[in-house]
Amino acid sequence: MFTDLSMVVFTVFAQMSVGAFIVLGAVQVYARVQGGRSAEDVDRVTDPALYAVGVTLALGLIASIFHLGTPMNAINVLRHVDSSWLSREIAFGLAFAGLGFVFAATQYFKWGSAALRQALAALTALVGVGLVVSMSMIYASLDAVPAWSTWVTPAQFAITTLLLGSLAVGAAFMGTVMWRRRQAADEEAEEPTTDAGDLETISTSLKGIAVASIVLLGAAFVVIPLHLNELSQGGAAAVASAEVFSGAMFALRLALVFLGAGLLGFFVYRFAARMESNPQPLAVVATVAFGLVFVGEFIGRSLFYESMTRIGM
Amino acid sequence: MATQLGFYFDQTRCNGCKACQVACKDKHDLPVGVTWRRVAEHGGGSWQSDGDTFSPSVFATYMSTACNHCERPVCAEVCPTTAMHQRDDGVVAVDDDLCVGCRYCEWACPYSAPQYNAELGSMTKCDLCTDYREEGLEPACVAGCPSRALDWGPIDELRERYGDVDAIEPLPDPAITEPRLVITPHRDAQMTGSGTGTIKNPLEV
């Protein structure tokens, strides 16, 4: 268990970053088009989460270095972009980090027009999708590893990306609300620091996140048995790799993702409807939901690496 | 294209003594856990009953494999650094100055040819004993086989002399990498994909 810890941390964190960035973009678009709010208003909600995305991605990239036997040669991994998905992954990863950093800086300092910053965000999101695609192709293109060389790999990576991204944004939004409330209480301010419009945006976002997480949970629970079915019908190596997806850790993974995304997802939706009076229950449920799914996905990714059984000898 | 080199393995002569494996390990001073040439025992079978008489119908064959210096070296294709490369003579080798030790080639190769050396922090593999060949010697495994089951040379010549069989269990489907390997199969050998046996010494290979 956890033999490829650096890879587990890197892939989970990088995918969560891409997912969260995309979800923040969705919140922006929805709040401005449907909610009729100004860019400045929505930025107030999404910016703290945006900075957290940057930290998460940086942690993931740092973790990936620990996977290398000769980190001093790390720069060489960009040499084979024309042939190696691993080179492409790192190229996309660095581009996503670079563009994301520039975008966060323009948001922080309010450089350039809102339209220009949105275009930059859209480009960053696109590069992020490229990162997840190239990441899944690293594994899906290996004919020697039956557990990986299947459509299931990109499907599972996409689900992890959006599921963890959604729940992380939900937890970050509620964390920000609670933190601002506490600050206001400490300063004994009369005015609430999160205004009603912002609370409306957050409440709507959390409802959307709850629905998304329940739908993605359903997708995950369709993909997993199809994967097992595929492996059971393959050769000896495929059958041997399927043994990883049994036992206590696999059961724990399924249970955690079900509880977090399914059961708590339902409560996130319920509590989001009445968060204006008291945001605390929503904050707790959204945070615990994220925590459970994070641990579940982390275990799931460890099992994914453990399922590396090659054909041949 | 220059002459492309490969290996020949006569399975009918191999008795699984692993002298090739040890000769390779000794020649290249390989640490514990790094074994460029390995010998797998592939066996299976069951009982046949005839009335009250049960008689065994079993088989066991040996397969000696190192790097096959493939026509389509997936290890070099997936290598992010270009450290894993194919020379003009077809030999696939690692450039230590470039290798980052990510072990991606190890995942990609169905013959377990690229192997990670933790002391070096980089990948290592069979280079068909380049230094020996430059001195006019044979690769250590070929020279070390007491039953002369191994040979090496330009793959065209090997195929002319020995045929073109390369899909024998427990080797993978040759379509994946197009190995430069020729095998004279044992009478009990099974074709890749239709085998009924298993590797009996998995911890050794």
Image (cartoon, rainbow, N blue to C red):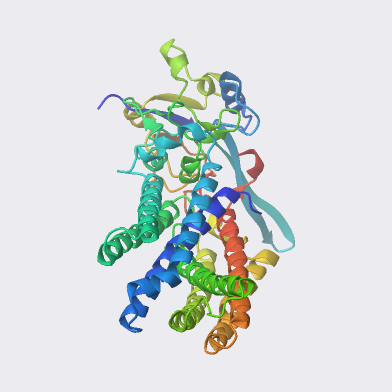
Q: Tell which of A192 and A30 is nearer to you.
A: A192
Q: Position of residue B72 (x, y in %)?
A: 35, 40
As displayed, is residue B59 above or below residue B95? below
Q: Tell which of B124 and B162 is nearer to you.
A: B124
Please identify the residue farthest to the top as the structure is shown: B135
Identified at 66% across, 30% down, the residue is B32
Q: In which quadrant is the C terminus of chain A drawn?
A: top right
Image quarter for residue A189? Answer: bottom right
As displayed, is residue A16 above or below residue B104? below
Identified at 37% across, 50% down, the residue is A98
Q: In which quadrant is the N terminus of chain A drawn?
A: bottom right
Identified at 63% across, 71% down, the residue is A186
Q: Position of residue A120 (x, y in %)?
A: 30, 60
Q: Tell which of B186 and A47 is nearer to you.
A: A47
Q: Position of residue A5 (x, y in %)?
A: 60, 50
Q: Is residue A309 visible?
A: no
Identified at 52% across, 18% down, the residue is B143
Q: Is residue B18 left or right of residue A92?
A: right
Q: Is residue A57 visible?
A: yes
Q: Position of residue B64 (x, y in %)?
A: 54, 34
Q: How many marks?
A: 0
Please identify the residue farthest to the right as the structure is shown: B52
Q: Tell which of B91 and A75 is nearer to you.
A: A75
Q: Is residue A135 left or right of residue B48?
A: left
Image quarter for residue A277? Answer: bottom right
